Image (cartoon, rainbow, N blue to C red):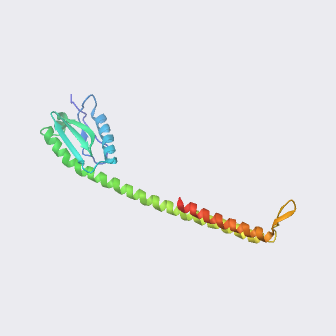
Amino acid sequence: MAAGPAIPARVNERDSPLVFRADFAGKDARRRAVEAGDALAAAIDSDAPSDVALVDITVNGDVAFVHVRGRAVTTLTGADAAAEGALDLSHYAEELETRLLPFVQDELRRSSAQQIALSVFLFVFFGLLGVLTLRALRNAFDRLERMLEERRAGLQPLKLLSIPLLSAEALRSVLLVGIFVSRILGYLIVTAV
């Protein structure tokens, strides 16, 4: 009976060089691959100090600890090295480190490109949304001014207890000033957001 699964369990991160064929610490190869994939994705997405190595595989006795950007990803054993056809764990660790480094660099470039694309998209989207909102505001205020001009003759003076406070022409002027101030405030609010 074989110690590991017949089909290797690959870490589910694009073409990751991390492959598990052996069980370790009570976890089967698939479970180890899932956990390593989650840890690898978290390490790539996290912020890391610039002085930390991108990939570091440290052999300590009969186990090797895989770190990406300073975060622990997985632990490898001699059984993993033997399943991959390596002479011993230290040779397997060296080979894996040389394959894992370009993979991590590519993933970081991809992640950076995605962030730039998202920033550009959001910039264009909110810029377009702002322009459309300004246009809608302009149309609304233009309609209010036209409506006020059309009803110019129908405006009645503002009265309080039959005492005229504002003539019809003064009321029209106050309404036009109010529309003008509202227009400016609307434009400022839209451009500030």
- Picture residue at 81% right of the left edge, 71% below the top: 153
- Picture residue at 77% right of the left edge, 67% below the top: 171
Q: Residue lying furthest left in this view?
A: 87
Q: How many numbered discs sit on the rendered protein? A: 0
Q: Evaluate whether residue 8 shows in this view.
A: no
- From the viewer's side, name the closer residue of 172 and 75: 172
Residue 17: image location, x then y, percent: 24, 45
Residue 178: image location, x then y, percent: 69, 65
Residue 115: image location, x then y, percent: 38, 55
- Picture residue at 31% right of the left edge, 41% below the top: 39
Q: Evaluate whether residue 94 shows in this view.
A: yes
Q: Residue lying furthest right in this view?
A: 162
Residue 191: image location, x then y, percent: 54, 62
> Does residue 163 appear left or right of residue 4 in this picture?
right
In the picture, which quadrant includes the N terminus? top left
Quadrant of res 167: bottom right
> Does residue 142 appear left or right of residue 109 in this picture?
right
- Picture residue at 33% right of the left edge, 41% below the top: 38
Figure check: 4 above or below 152: above
Quadrant of res 162: bottom right
- From the viewer's side, name the closer residue of 46 and 75: 46
- From the viewer's side, name the closer residue of 184 and 128: 184
Quadrant of res 130: bottom right
Figure check: 165 above or below 57: below
